Image (cartoon, rainbow, N blue to C red):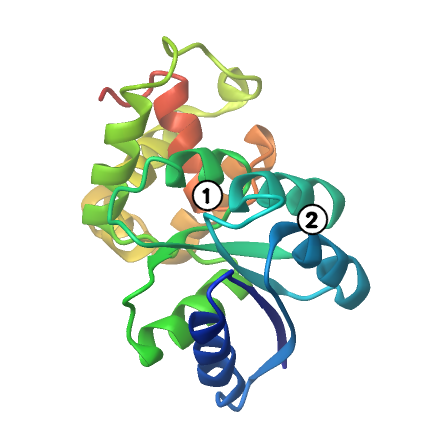
Amino acid sequence: MTRVVVADDQPVVLLGFAAILGSAPDLQVVGAANDGRELLALVAAEKPDVAVVDVRMPHLDGIAATARITAEHPATRVLILTTFDLDEYVYDALRAGASGFLLKDVTAARLVEAVRMVADGSMLLGPTVTRRLVEDFTARAPVPAPMAGIADLTPRELEILRAVARGLSNAEIGAELWIAEPTVKSHVSEALRKLGCRDRVQLVIAAYESGLVGV
């Protein structure tokens, strides 16, 4: 059973998302918060597997709350909710440690699927969204600089990191490089470990910020 908390300052949205997630047989909603401070207290008390968090909230916004959650409760993954497809705050939230994002007009089935994916450590963002989102916001970031761990990657791991940054799945990378999918997964895991990244979304960010992939 995956334990979930939901945070949104709009009561109708909050109740709606909590009801949708609570109806899934493998998800358990253990709490709901109306603002960032309530969310932090809820996460500390319940230790959920996934926190579904709105970007814009009073008292403490979703970005600041995400940074606190990922720093203080690393076992809890954060799924960001946003109103706009390229919300200017989403990239900052991903850098703060969020595992992905969804638009608020998401279907019920997609919301449930997204929570399951994030809980499983999978990449939530699809190839098109990944490229568009990261390219748009890394273009506004400082000049790329090598990050710790990049030099430790093998040539194959660098190749796969670039493919991940293009938004390719393990299966697509395997087909492109003519290697087995489990081998791709092993290389991705090593890249995650060496770069200190939580998930594939952070690998994408790392690849762009280090200049491995141009914007």
Residue drawn at 46 percent across, 48 percent down = 56
Q: Looking at the image, which is closer to me, 32 or 153?
A: 32
Is residue 115 placed above or below 102 in the rendered structure?
A: below
Is residue 44 placed above or below 109 in the rendered structure?
A: above
Residue drawn at 32 percent across, 73 percent down = 110
Q: Which numbered marker is on residue 74?
A: 2
Type of amino acid under label 1? Val
Residue drawn at 24 percent across, 42 percent down = 177
In the picture, residue 43 is in which quadrant?
bottom right
Residue that badge 1 annotates = 188
Q: Looking at the image, which is closer to me, 154 or 40?
A: 40
Is disc 1 placed on a helix, strand or loop? Answer: helix
In the rendered image, residue 183, in percent from the top left (x then y), is placed at 42, 50
For the residues bearing labels 1 and 2, Cβ distance under 8 angstroms: no
Residue drawn at 45 percent across, 58 percent down = 122
The reply, left or right, for residue 152 in relation to residue 72 is: left
Q: Looking at the image, which is closer to me, 129 or 9?
A: 9
Is disc 2 placed on a helix, strand or loop? Answer: loop
Question: Comparing marks 1 and 2, which lies closer to the viewer?
Answer: 2
The reply, left or right, for residue 84 in relation to residue 79 is: left
